[in-house]
Amino acid sequence: MRIPPLALLCALSACVATTRYRLPLAGNTERAATEACYLGCRTRAPGDALYACLARCPVIDVTPGAACGAADDPPAALCEQTRRIEPGKTALAIVAVAATVGFIATLAAVDSQGDCWWECQ
């Protein structure tokens, strides 16, 4: 059965959009102003408002489709990222999660009945 692994893949990645908010520290000529804006957003903007606030800070690089990586760690940079279900894919994500849960429940039911369907010796 191949549907559940594909459903899990969709639920975990394909239906999700990632956006990276990166503040370069090394070589940033506006570092003081950018850090003040970044820290102000972190302390005053809760939840989703944080990312709207960060997008208005000078020098912060907003990159849809990118994620924070090892090169984005201090002292090179400060980095935040969002992961959201893409518009129009909410139903697909719900179906994917439901299919995965159903598959796991089926495996648990078969295993609890003592059927030898995997690693029998």
Image: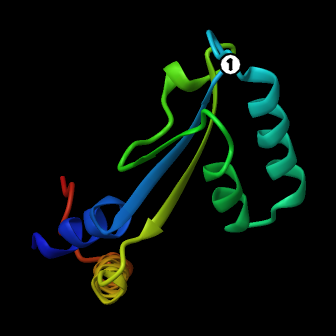
Along the horizontal axis of the image, is 15 left or right of 33?
A: left
The residue under label 1 is: 74
25 sits to left or right of 113? right
Which one is in front, 39 or 98?
Answer: 39
Q: Using a 10 Å C-alpha cutoff, classify the residue at mark 1 as few (fewer than 14 neighbours), some (14 to 19) or many (20 or more).
A: few
Give the amino acid at mark 1.
Pro
In the depicted view, which residue is nearer to us: 36 or 6? Answer: 36
Coordinates of residue 102 in the picture (x, y in percent): 32, 86
Secondary structure, mark 1, is loop
**As displayed, is residue 2 above or below residue 13?**
below
Residue 66 in percent (x, y) is at: 39, 43
The residue shown at (38%, 61%) is: 17
Q: Height in image: 82 above or below 59?
A: below
Q: Is residue 70 left or right of residue 29?
A: left
Where does residue 12 sit, x and y in percent of width and height? Answer: 37, 62
Along the line of sight, the residue nearer the viewer: 107 or 75:
75
Q: In the rendered view, how is the structure colored?
A: rainbow
- Quadrant of the image for the N terminus? bottom left
Q: Position of residue 92 (x, y in %)?
A: 27, 84
Which residue corresponds to the image point at 46% horizontal and 52% vertical from the top-left?
A: 19
Vertical placement of residue 75 versus 66, above or below: above
Q: Quadrant of residue 90?
A: bottom left
Using the image as rendered, state which of residue 27 and residue 75 is in the foreground.
27
Looking at the image, can residue 12 be seen?
A: yes
Q: How many marks?
A: 1
Does 74 sit above or below residue 98?
A: above
